[in-house]
Amino acid sequence: MEYLKIMDELSFSRIIQGFWRLVQWDWDAKKLEEFMQGCIQRGVTTFDTAEIYGFGECETQLGRVFARNPSLRHKIQLVSKTGIFNHDGFKYYDTSYERIKTSCKESLQRLSCDYLDLYLIHREDPCFDPRETARAMLELKKEGLVKEIGVSNFDPYKFQALNEFAGNQLCTNQIEWNPCCYEHIQSGMIDLLTQKEIHPMVWSPLAGGKIFTSQEAPYVRVREKLAEIGQRHGVAAEVIAYAWILYHPVKAMPIVGSRKLSRLDNAIKALDVKLQRWEWYEIYTASTGERLR
Ligand SMILES: NC(=O)c1ccc[n+]([C@@H]2O[C@H](COP(=O)([O-])OP(=O)(O)OC[C@H]3O[C@@H](n4cnc5c(N)ncnc54)[C@H](OP(=O)(O)O)[C@@H]3O)[C@@H](O)[C@H]2O)c1
């Protein structure tokens, strides 16, 4: 496994395991602990969750494992997020000072932990006040409840605004990126992160599985191209999808969302695949249908 320094005192495994779908997996604490041990044995030591996943249930289930086996906590880097809430089934965002401070303590309680390695603002909040949000995040750091701070799904303007008030301490932006999703390439976010040498965490690297299941034309074209390039390299199509993300100089960290360790192995295998630049573009143009000038 490769590890990336994301701040002076914090390194993440280049491949991260995500737990968004954990509640659907319907596992007991023993099965979840075995899965987490399987990740750690493979060197995948960074785990991603959020307070909104299963409305707190995902953190609660992870917390049961840390309570059963406290030694596990020190073998991993734990990431959680705040900012998305429900009011009687109605979804809204809240990045206010009070909400962030309260949410972090609630997450730690559910997770049976004393601290988070990284705490993220989950989504852009149109009512976002970067001064207030930065004040809350920096206080959490000072109190030792979180080691580092960052954001998720931010555009370059909101990222810069918060980073300025946070004393340039944002250490990642967790973004959606895969061969069928170009929002953050088009916005310039990936260029900004490359310039600042900040490594993004990448969610839905396989478009939530759609790259292998959807019948929509871009997904079908990408699927066929990944299989063709995979044959060239002697690996599965999935491995090439991860290699395509890892190729970029921003040094992204894909978050695997599967419940199967065999699929996590495909992501790890991608660290050894060296795509040619023209192969990267074969996948890019298969997705966009573009003929480059
Ligand atoms: N910050 C954010 O806003 C945000 C949003 C979404 C997610 N996330 C984070 O990112 C993580 C990953 O996201 P994700 O779960 O969408 O990632 P993903 O890895 O793109 O998708 C995982 C899904 O794809 C399925 N899958 C994988 N390989 C497949 C294949 N070859 N054929 C068919 N299905 C396949 C998996 O099923 P199996 O389990 O059966 O393998 C699983 O349901 C989440 O766990 C969460 O931590 C963050």
Image (spheres, rainbow, N blue to C red):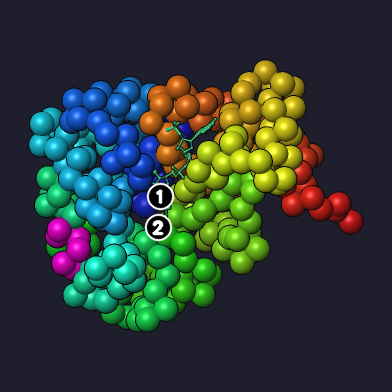
- The residue tagged 2 is 171
Residue 167 % position (x, y): 36, 71
Separation of residues labelled 1 and 2 (CA atoms) = 6 Å
How many numbered callouts?
Answer: 2
Residue 15 % position (x, y): 45, 36
Instruction: Work out which residue is located at the far right of the displayed protein and give it.
Output: 293
- The residue tagged 1 is 6
Reply above or below: 102 against 258: below
Classify residue 30 as left or right of residue 207. Answer: left
Residue 24 % position (x, y): 32, 39
- Disc 1 residue crowd, few under 14, some 14–19, many 20+, Cα 10 Å: some
Which residue is at 29% across, 62% downward?
82
Q: Classify residue 77 by image quadrant.
A: top left
Classify residue 151 as left or right of residue 117. Answer: right
Which residue is at 29% across, 56% downward?
52
Q: Secondary structure at mark 2?
A: strand
Q: Classify residue 19 by image quadrant.
A: top left
Which residue is at 45% across, 22% downward?
262
The answer, for residue 109, to whether it is visible in the render is yes
**Circles 1 and 2: CB atoms closer than 8 Å:** yes
Task: Identify which amino acid the numbered label 2 is placed on.
Answer: Cys
